[in-house]
Image (tube, rainbow, N blue to C red):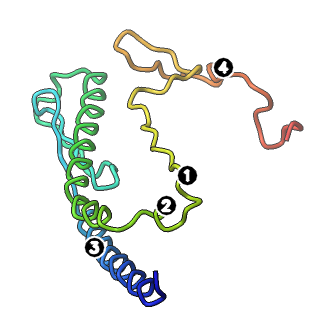
Amino acid sequence: MTNEQAKAELAAILDGVQEQMRTIAELQQRRAELTATAAARGKKVKVTVNADNKVIDVKFASNVDELSYSEIAKAVIEAAQRACTEVARQTAGLMAPLENQRAQLPKLSDLVEDLAGVEIPGSVEAPTTRPNSLGSQMVSDGSAAPRTSMRDLPRGRGGSATDSSW
């Protein structure tokens, strides 16, 4: 390959990268505007999340009092998870043009021989189940029993800022 060919190839790659950066900037703005709303328990509970999967609104129907507190809590979680799934679907659709552009660019391992064997680890999905806590006790409706006094707190080492274990 001649020096002129290498320069032309590099210029083409840089043009592709610049186009991809413009696309990324536009997609980031459009993604930031995404929201999704989902309902649970016969539309008695509605939850809206933003593009970062943060709950931004919760609405209860006038007949939500037909549900127990535990059922309401479960409905909020179900609706939030459904809304997050919808935001993820919208985000994937939004990012499709970027994936098409990326597929047209050469891989870094094509340009640098020593990178051919390097693999980027995939993401690990966080659990959507309740955390198990040694300090919480479950009651019949599935919720945690409230602590009623300092005696109910788990005993551990120390307990205050003036404790000598600091």
Percent position (x, y) of residue 131? Answer: 48, 27
Marks 4 and 3, Cα distance to the nearest angstrom? Answer: 58 Å
Image position of 11 with respect to 92: above or below: below
* Residue drawn 42% across the image and 38% down it: 125
| Amino acid type, residue under disc 2 in the picture | Ser
Question: Which residue position holds label 2?
Answer: 109
Question: Which residue position holds label 1?
Answer: 118
Question: Which residue position holds label 4?
Answer: 151
* Residue drawn 34% across the image and 54% down it: 52
Question: Between 71 and 27, which is closer to the camera in this rendering?
Answer: 27
Q: Nearer the viewer, mark 1 or mark 3?
A: 1
Question: Which residue position holds label 3?
Answer: 23
Q: Nearer the viewer, mark 3 or mark 2?
A: 2
Marks 1 and 2, Cα distance to the nearest angstrom? Answer: 8 Å
Question: Between 96 and 109, which is closer to the camera in this rendering?
Answer: 109
Near mark 2 (Cα within 10 A), the count class, few <14, some 14-19 or many ≥20, is few
Compared across the picture, whether 63 is left or right of 67 comes to: left
Percent position (x, y) of residue 110? Answer: 46, 63
| Amino acid type, residue under disc 4 in the picture | Arg
Q: Secondary structure at mark 3?
A: helix
**Tag 4 or tag 1, which sits nearer the N-term?**
1
Compared across the picture, whether 152 is left or right of 160 comes to: left
Percent position (x, y) of residue 109? Answer: 49, 61
Compared across the picture, whether 92 is left or right of 15 comes to: left
| Amino acid type, residue under disc 1 in the picture | Val
